[in-house]
Image: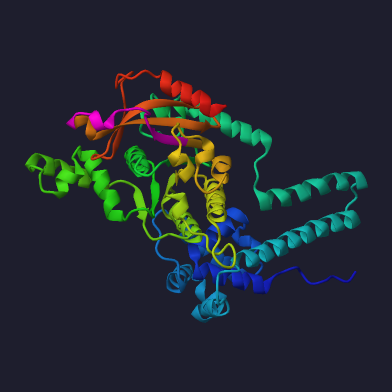
């Protein structure tokens, strides 16, 4: 029997590793999570050693930069640098990969060659058994399907139904072993905590008209989660890092930001502001104000997952994220928002995190004299389709803001509505939005003296 050469993809392996060195966190995450490639999927021993080192560096809780120098030092510490060809070999991988744009193609070819080698290995074992052993044909044949099943399991790593059921059961039961069982990440508002939960792999849309308080509620949720030990990553395209932190500090300190900026705060308030600063400094929250492209956003999210194991990613807001790579020329808002929604949902599942995506309403919804509905989400129906949960913020209709006393002018009667909830019932609750403090709080029943009949009738009209 004439044996053909062992299936391998030398060029693809070089391109894949070169791409990892050029864009480490994006490409390494893609290799590990999307293509499920282990280091032994690479045929070359030198490539396996390189990939193993980079995987460990990317997965470390507190990792350093991944580049030719740090990878070289890590290999030298293992006494493997000279074995793979030294620094010159690593430099050659980078020089031979002018761009990481085609990383997915390289990884696809590496995976394909690895699967073919595994098939050849199984066939060789079955071939030798059929010739050299005294087992019956039926006995050998019974092992063939098991061998190929091991290949499938090794490259997909998908759990069996029994494993999935056991994992689900164990997670639920484990929550009841604590005095305060944790059923998902709390949003920080009593009503939302009763109605929904931020579970890994899901995506929540937080929508409202301009000035409704979306960014304030997002910040309140993030700080609340971080103070409970969850790690959060924030993409803030709508405002810079300093404004976000000012709002967070004023919310924690109970200080009006306009008064603080105008110098009207006394020593007691300034002391509270400094205490809030100390609290914020220690929170596991990471802010990105420069990721305006969806590919930049996705790459940064993967990096944050690998470096800090984030639980929540927030994006403010969907209509400001660009996806200019979609087509020649300028893509439409519908195309961009659809792609952003799809990619955020993909990130949530791939990284096993929850994504909170802020959104505006369409202009038609702004003009409508009724509570909002799901079709009012601006730009694309994909937002409604992709979301696990949708939360609306809207003003109470007919509330006489122009007749309020001074105190009420600084707090807004706002309805927080769960408009879509895949894991529970939709509903709504009255809240006060304290504008100068960037804080929402649940209001007492019938708190502004108006009957609910008007809103109830409008909501019935909306649902028709």
**Depth order, front residue of 379/101:** 379
Residue 31 in picture, x, y percent from top left: 58, 59
Residue 202 in picture, x, y percent from top left: 52, 40
Residue 337 in picture, x, y percent from top left: 53, 52
Residue 210 in picture, x, y percent from top left: 37, 44
Looking at the rendering, the stretch of residues picked out in magenta corresponds to 391-406
Q: Is residue 67 magenta?
A: no
Please state if 436 lies on the left or on the right of 66 as rendered.
left
Residue at image position (31%, 56%) is 240
Residue at image position (44%, 35%) is 392
Looking at the image, is 100 positioned above or below residue 366? below
Residue at image position (23%, 44%) is 249
The reply to whether residue 255 is visible in this rendering is yes
Looking at the image, is 120 positioned above or below residue 384? below
How many marks can you see? 0
Looking at the image, is 269 positioned above or below residue 102? above
**Depth order, front residue of 66/452:** 452
Q: Is residue 392 magenta?
A: yes
Among the 4 quarters of the image, the one containing residue 414: top left
């Amino acid at each position: 029997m004439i044996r053909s050469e062992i299936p391998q993809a030398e060029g693809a392996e070089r391109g894949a590793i070169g791409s990892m060195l050029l864009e480490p966190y994006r490409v390494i995450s893609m290799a590990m999570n999307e293509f499920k490639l282990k280091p032994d999927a690479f045929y070359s021993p030198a490539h396996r050693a390189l990939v193993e080192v980079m995987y460990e560096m990317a997965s470390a809780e507190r990792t350093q930069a991944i580049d030719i120098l740090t990878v070289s030092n890590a290999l030298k510490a293992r006494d493997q640098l000279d074995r793979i060809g030294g620094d010159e070999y690593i430099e050659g991988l980078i020089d031979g990969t002018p761009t990481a744009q085609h990383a997915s193609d390289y990884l696809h070819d590496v995976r394909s060659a690895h699967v073919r080698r595994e098939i050849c290995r199984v066939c060789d074992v079955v071939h030798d058994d059929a010739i050299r052993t005294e087992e019956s044909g039926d006995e050998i044949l019974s092992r063939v399907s098991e061998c190929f099943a091991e290949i499938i399991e090794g490259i997909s790593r998908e759990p069996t139904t029994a494993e999935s059921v056991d994992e689900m059961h164990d997670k639920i039961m484990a929550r009841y072993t604590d005095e305060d069982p944790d059923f998902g990440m709390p949003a920080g508002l009593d009503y939302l905590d009763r109605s929904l939960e931020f579970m890994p792999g899901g995506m929540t849309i937080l929508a409202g008209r301009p000035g409704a308080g979306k960014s304030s509620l997002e910040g309140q949720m993030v700080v609340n989660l971080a103070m409970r030990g969850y790690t959060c990553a924030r993409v803030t395209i709508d405002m810079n890092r300093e404004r976000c932190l000012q709002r967070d500090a004023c919310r924690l300190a109970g200080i009006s930001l306009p008064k603080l900026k105008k110098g009207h705060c006394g020593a007691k308030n300034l002391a509270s502001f400094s205490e809030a600063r100390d609290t914020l400094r220690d929170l596991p929250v990471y802010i990105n104000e420069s990721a305006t492209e969806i590919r930049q956003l996705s790459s940064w999210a993967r990096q944050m997952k690998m470096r800090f194991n984030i639980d929540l990613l927030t994006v403010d807001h969907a209509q400001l994220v660009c996806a200019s790579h979609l087509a020649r020329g300028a893509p439409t808002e519908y195309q961009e928002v659809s792609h952003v929604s799809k990619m955020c949902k993909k990130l949530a599942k791939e990284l096993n995190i929850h994504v909170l995506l802020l959104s505006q309403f369409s202009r038609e919804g702004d003009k409508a004299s009724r509570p909002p509905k799901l079709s009012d989400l601006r730009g694309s129906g994909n937002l409604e389709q992709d979301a696990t949960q949708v939360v609306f913020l809207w003003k109470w209709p007919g509330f006489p803001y122009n007749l309020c006393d001074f105190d009420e002018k600084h707090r807004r009667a706002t309805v927080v509505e769960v408009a879509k909830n895949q894991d529970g019932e939709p509903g709504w609750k009255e809240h006060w939005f304290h504008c100068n403090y960037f804080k929402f709080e649940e209001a007492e029943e019938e708190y502004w003296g108006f009957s609910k009949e008007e809103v109830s009738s409008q909501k019935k009209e909306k649902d028709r």
